[in-house]
Amino acid sequence: MLILDNLWIILALPLLGAAINGLLGKNFSKPAVNSVGIGSVALSFLCVVELLREFAQLSAAQIPWVKNYFTWITAGQFRVDFSLQVDQLTLVMLGVVTFVSLLVHIYSTGYMAHEEGYYRFFSYLNLFVFFMLTLVLAANVVLMFVGWEGVGLCSYLLIGFWFLKQSAISAGKKAFITTRIGDFGFTVGILLLFWTFHSVDFRAVFQQAANMPTEAFAPAGVLTIICLLLFAGAIGKSAQLPLYVWLPDAMEGPTPVSALIHAATMVTAGVYMVARMNPLFSRAPFAMFIVALVGALTAFYAATIGLVQTDIKKVLAYSTVSQLGYMFLGLGVGSYAAGIFHLMTHAFFKGLLFLAAGSVIHAMGGDQEMPHMGGLRTKIPITFWTMFIATFAIAGIPGFAGFFSKDEILDAARSGPHANIWLWLLGLIGAGLTSFYMFRLIFLTFFGKPRYDEHKVHVHESPKSMTVPLILLAILSAVGGWVAAPHLVGGTDYFEKFVHPVFATYAPNELEHTHLLREAGAPEIRVLHPDEPPVYPGHAPEWLKALAGPPVIVALIGLLLAWWFYIKSPDTPKKLAQSLRGPYTVILHKYYVDELYNAAIIQPLLWISTNVLWHVVDEGLIDGTVNGTARVARESGAQLREIQSGNARTYASWVVIGAVGVTLLMLGLWGMGR
Amino acid sequence: MNVVPISYYLVLSAILFGLGVVAFVFKRNIITIFMAIELMLNAVNLAFVAFARAHNQLDGLVFVFFVIVVAAAEAAVGLAIAITVYQNRRTLNIEQINLLKF
């Protein structure tokens, strides 16, 4: 019970690394910075592995395992402890975060080798890992919020890592401010949560929530409002409609950062949070519907933008937004396990895609435009093969990681407890689009003839420090989904079985729940025993049905279309773009959303800030008051100064005038001398 | 006995004091201003003595002695200052002795 009793050590290691590198790293050699940066995360990863072993020995009653270290805030009834907890969901997140972080750290030693501020980069990365681990280990919602804001800060710092570049600074600010809008909702949600349950502790809140009935779809009760407010935070952090705009811009940061923060871990914090809050969400059907709706719309919408992007990282960025949408779709239709499963597989294959894209950019000498690439397949074979595997995974080709997770989500959307056929359809089309734009990326980058100047660009494979993480992630992208595979042949979904207790312990009363769903016209639902993993009806036990199901078919259609467009007859896209000029232009400009936000929100705010807040309130009111006070003092002083002339005879005159005055007063007013 | 009424003394005292004040305010020479101060002090002394006589009490007379002592001391210090000022500045005009004035 070494780690279980000392949970803090998982957090402390990256923090220590960040402190050492950040404070002293300037004078360190690169190997020293590397060993501190990688060493701290590697130790943290080993702790998580050991934690996994120890966790397996706990009895069901001991989970979630909570460790209370000290009381952080007390104010009347309001009390926040610094307490950490471990359950199955935490373990999944811990594993993903520490493992991907470790690989990204190793990769960065190669990718960032020639950059200024090397130590600063590693310090920020370690700090990020610390905050991310705080987020997933927190046993109450306030401590979770600390991690939540901390990762936002690190995201800001790392997007703006090249702080001499104007676009990088703007992107950092955009990310920070946009997520802040969602966080406002999150904060209000926390307050409402405390108001309702008189506690911010997960266990206490969930135990009370377990006794509350499932709320009606409409009118919504307090649980629904709490959930919607919390989800607002998730929308900002996980880049969903309408707050997704910061994520594509965040690609200004170094590529390892995009892989770690803006693909694998931080942006999934919203998914984690909703899954963590499942006892509340499960009792708020309307909030669930909104989660699923936002997820499905985002999945489809971002995928369409991904179709026409030419910057390799931008395609991946929109793809990330879209895949996060799938996760929320999974959560929203009630299949929390599928959402978390997709979070995990996505961390592998999207982390890999970004790292591989970084390797491509590295090979191209910094060029990110796909129209400048082509034919890189033979030049950088390791990058090609790993990226190819990741593309198979994200497209949902059977056998690869993404296939299992995406299939589960779409299956739940079609036949799960909160199924909705329209959302399923959106997700399905999105899956086809995903397959298309991902294979488009592969074909444009690696196939065909080179379109760059071979005399100027010397394409070369990346160093071992970069290719080894690629290979490790490629293995996971290929086999990472197999834990769920036996399910297809009628066996157990081991992932779902593992995380099931987290979502079943405080689940709403099944009978009542089923009754509500029947009223809503849902297909037949089996009543679950809490210990039994759910088996959704229609989730084909026959492997054939899954392999030849609609998601696979649309993925293959996407693959074939991409092949037709970009290999067989490369003129087709241009012709199509010309014949569909209108829609093409709209999508190319990302639906003009940035322009719309600029005109509808930013410009009015800027106008009010400049003309009202600045010129009237600040300059007029505040400066006026301050300067006015000073002017009154100065001018009255200037006047009064005249009296104190320093001239003895003037003083004497005042004395005489005073004496005469007092005498007259005594005589006249007080009537003395009579 | 034909006693001079006290009001005579007081009026004389007031006139002397007034002259002293006027001289103090309007004269520019330090020596003259000292003389004005002496004049005012002695005008007050006269009033004290007159009251002491009228009320047959010694308090007023004691006061007068004190005033004379203070006036003597003040004249000694003041005249010393006046001499020093004159040695340094070659003038006794109070208008021109204004180095410490803001």
Image (tube, rainbow, N blue to C red):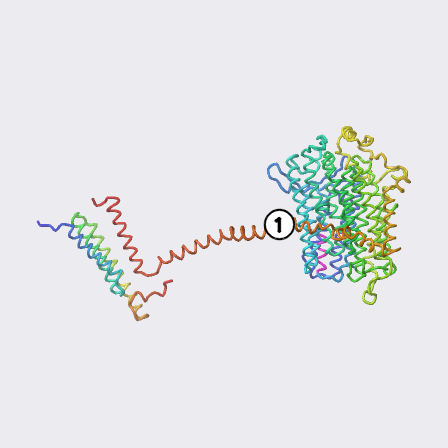
- In the image, residue A89 above or below residue A659: above
In the figure, is residue B102 to the left or right of A612?
Answer: left
Range shown magenta: A117-126
Residue A645 percent across, percent down from the top left: 35, 60
Q: Which kind of residue does numbered mark 1 sit on?
A: Pro
Q: Does residue A616 belong to the magenta stretch?
A: no
Q: Nearer the viewer, residue A392 or B30?
A: A392
Q: Chain of mark 1?
A: A
Choose between B78 and A183: the one closer to the eye.
A183
Q: Quadrant of the C terminus of chain A?
A: top left
Above or below — where is A404 with respect to A206?
below
Whole-percent x and y of residue A512? 76, 28
Q: Residue furthest left?
A: B1
The quadrant of the picture occupied by the N terminus of chain A is top right
Asked whether residue A255 is in view, the answer is: yes
Between A423 and A330, the residue placed more toward the observer is A423
Q: Is residue A376 left or right of residue A6?
A: right
Q: Residue at x 65, y 48 (%)?
A: A600
Task: Where is residue B86? Give x, y as percent.
Answer: 30, 69
